[in-house]
Amino acid sequence: MPIKAILTDIEGTTSAVSFVFDVLFPYAAKHLPDFVRQHAAHADVAEQLDAVRRDSNEPNADVERVIEIVLGWIAEDRKATPLKALQGMVWEQGYQAGELKGHVYPDAVEALKRWYQDGFKLFVYSSGSIQAQKLIFGCSEAGDLSPLFSGYFDTTSGPKREAKSYERITQAIDLDASQILFLSDIVEELDAARTAGMATCGLAREGGELAGHVTVDSFARIDPSTL
Ligand SMILES: [Mg+2]
């Protein structure tokens, strides 16, 4: 069946991996302490601080101690839910202040716009939270790209290297799996998507090949109507 929807990964696919690791994470680590101090009394922040106390078994930790715990989690790259939530809040403030702009490769911007105009439905599947995904595209260097997208999926749909996750996403998109083209820079993700029946295309921006999949170095070389 012809492709009707395109599901894309972010890191290493639409956007530079270095944006996440060299810009977003350091920004969160730098601004999180003051953000928490300033907003500790706000309900949504207080809720996450309590979650940190619970997860770390330190029910009486004061705000400074909670900050210390969270910075420790960042250092060890722990994917704790309250940490993700707090990072998301810090990023949101940074994007709104114009201090952060989401990186999206120009070839990806151009192709996503063209595919949208050609009637393809566009979706995102990334291990970053849906909130973080919306910010990268909504406050990107190329402006607000969020109107291009019909939906966002994160790891609440399951891990990215498991076929079951792609089956769940297929159900949510409500098309046949063979009508969905999945784009990623990680071969295990492409394998999982193919097992679920999706079409695949690998992105190797530095060149090379993602074994077993059509591989390109730019969105400019992807033609969904021929895949
Ligand atoms: Mg990736």
Image (cartoon, helix red, strand yellow):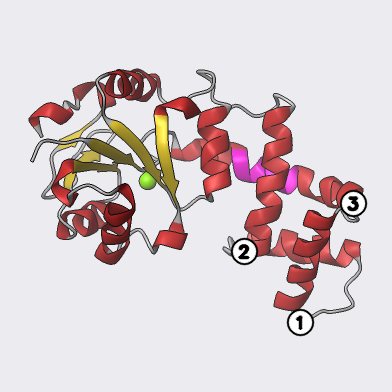
Residue type for callout 2: Thr
At 71% from the left edge and 29% from the top edge, which residue is drawn?
A: 96
Q: Quadrant of residue 46?
A: bottom right
Question: What mark, if any, has residue 81 been given in the picture?
Answer: 2
Residue holding disc 1 = 57
Assess disc 1: are there few (<14), some (14-19) or many (≥20) residues with their C-alpha within 10 Å of its C-alpha: few
Vertical order, 33 against 140 (above or below): below
Closer to the N terminus: mark 1 or mark 3?
A: 3
Q: Name the amino acid type tagged 1.
A: Asn
Q: Main secondary structure of the magenta part?
A: helix
Nearer to the camera, 168 or 18: 168
Earlier along the polypeptide chain: callout 2 or callout 1?
1
* Residues at marks 1 and 3, CA–CA distance in whole angstroms: 21 Å
In the rendered structure, which segment of residues is drawn in magenta?
24-30
* Image quadrant in which the C terminus is located: top left
From the viewer's perspective, is 160 left or right of 98? left
Which residue appears farthest toward the front when viewing the image?
A: 174
Horizontal relation, residue 142 to residue 177: left or right: right
Secondary structure category for the residue under label 1: loop
Residue beneath the point at 23% across and 51% down: 190
Q: Residue at x 8, y 41 (%)?
A: 1
Question: Residue 155 in magenta?
Answer: no
Instruction: Name the residue beneath numbered marker 3.
Output: 37
Q: Amino acid at mark 3?
A: Arg
Q: Secondary structure at mark 2?
A: helix
Q: Give percent across and percent down for residue 126.
A: 43, 48
Residue 223 visible in the shown view? yes
